[in-house]
């Protein structure tokens, strides 16, 4: 499907924003590159990014050079049980970016999370294949239904004014005694250079347990998210 096809379906379901969460390290690489970049694109350039347990499957199933976004803020939805395991930095993008993708881009929507894919499956078991099918079965915030943006270069350029950042405050310090939240802000602002992004401190729901869960992390796991 093309970007406008998926945009029309999302807009019809009142989905106005797309979301991508990642670690501080990987997010800073995105900011320096000027866009959300695929795992493969960043690897080829030899730039810093945090490893993910899905990397091997992404390579195996041909989505290593694709960019993934969600239709919902995972932290907001699942914070009662766990913080967003992709990372504390959330990029919020206007859904209209789908109408202005680089030439020859393709937009796919998964029917199930790629971690559940198996060898030999036909394409129509992994992805919605037509706008009408997508319109009939897409449900906002269903974690299996991920939007996959496939560009020739494996990067989705940021569009000025259409991207903002929401940052978790874990209320915890790094091993060197620095506030993890302030450290992350400094890193993000430095990586943004002369084109700063609006950074908003996350305001959690009353039943969110993210601070408790961040504090329960081991030092090494915590550093993976915030360093």
Image: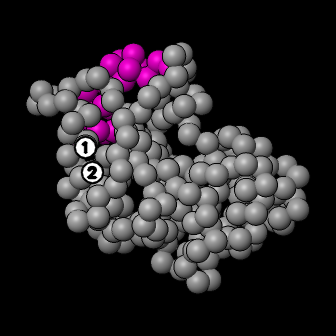
On screen, 102 above or below 64? below
Question: Quick one: 102 or 205, which is closer to the camera?
Answer: 205
Looking at the image, which residue is at 73% across and 48% down?
14
In-image side of 223 versus 107 (left or right) = left
Residue lying at the far front in this picture: please name it: 161
For the residue labelled by badge 2, is the local secondary structure a helix, a strand or a loop? helix
The range drawn in magenta is: 208-227
In-image side of 121 versus 101 (left or right) = right
On screen, 89 above or below 123? above
Looking at the image, which residue is at 77% across and 49% down?
13
The label shown at residue 188 is 2
The label shown at residue 60 is none
Residue 185 visible in image? yes
Q: Quadrant of residue 44?
A: bottom left
> Picture coordinates of residue 225 (x, y %)?
33, 38
> Picture coordinates of residue 29 (x, y %)?
31, 60
Which image quarter is the C terminus in?
top left
* Crowdedness near tag 1: few (<14), some (14–19) or many (≥20) residues, C-alpha within 10 Å: some
Looking at the image, which residue is at 78% across and 59% down?
9
Residue 59 visible in image? no
* Crowdedness near tag 2: few (<14), some (14–19) or many (≥20) residues, C-alpha within 10 Å: many
Main secondary-structure element of the magenta-colored stretch: helix
The label shown at residue 185 is 1
> Picture coordinates of residue 177 (x, y %)?
12, 27
Looking at the image, which residue is at 29% across and 23% down?
171
For the residue labelled by badge 1, is the local secondary structure a helix, a strand or a loop? helix
Tell me how far mark 1 sits from mark 2, CA to CA: 5 Å
> Picture coordinates of residue 12 (x, y %)?
79, 55
Q: Are marks 1 and 2 in contact (CB under 8 Å)?
A: yes
């Amino acid at each position: 499907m093309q970007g406008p096809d998926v945009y029309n379906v999302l807009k019809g379901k009142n989905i106005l924003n797309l979301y991508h969460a990642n670690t501080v390290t990987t997010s800073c690489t995105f900011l320096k590159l000027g866009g959300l970049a695929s795992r493969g694109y960043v690897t080829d350039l030899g730039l810093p990014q945090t490893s993910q347990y899905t990397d091997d499957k992404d390579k195996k199933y041909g989505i290593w050079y694709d960019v993934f976004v969600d239709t919902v803020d995972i932290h907001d939805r699942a914070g009662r049980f766990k913080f967003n395991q992709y990372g504390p930095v959330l990029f919020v993008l206007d859904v209209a970016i789908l109408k202005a993708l680089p030439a020859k881009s393709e937009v796919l929507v998964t029917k199930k999370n790629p971690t559940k894919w198996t060898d030999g499956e036909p394409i129509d078991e992994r992805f919605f294949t037509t706008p009408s099918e997508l319109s009939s079965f897409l449900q906002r915030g269903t974690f299996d239904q991920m939007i996959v943006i496939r560009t020739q270069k494996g990067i989705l350029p940021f569009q000025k004014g259409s991207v903002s950042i929401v940052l978790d405050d874990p209320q915890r310090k790094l091993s060197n005694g620095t506030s993890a939240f302030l450290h992350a802000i400094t890193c993000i602002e430095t990586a943004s250079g002369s084109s700063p992004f609006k950074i908003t401190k996350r305001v959690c729901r009353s039943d969110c347990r993210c601070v408790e869960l961040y504090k329960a992390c081991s030092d090494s796991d915590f550093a993976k998210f915030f360093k």
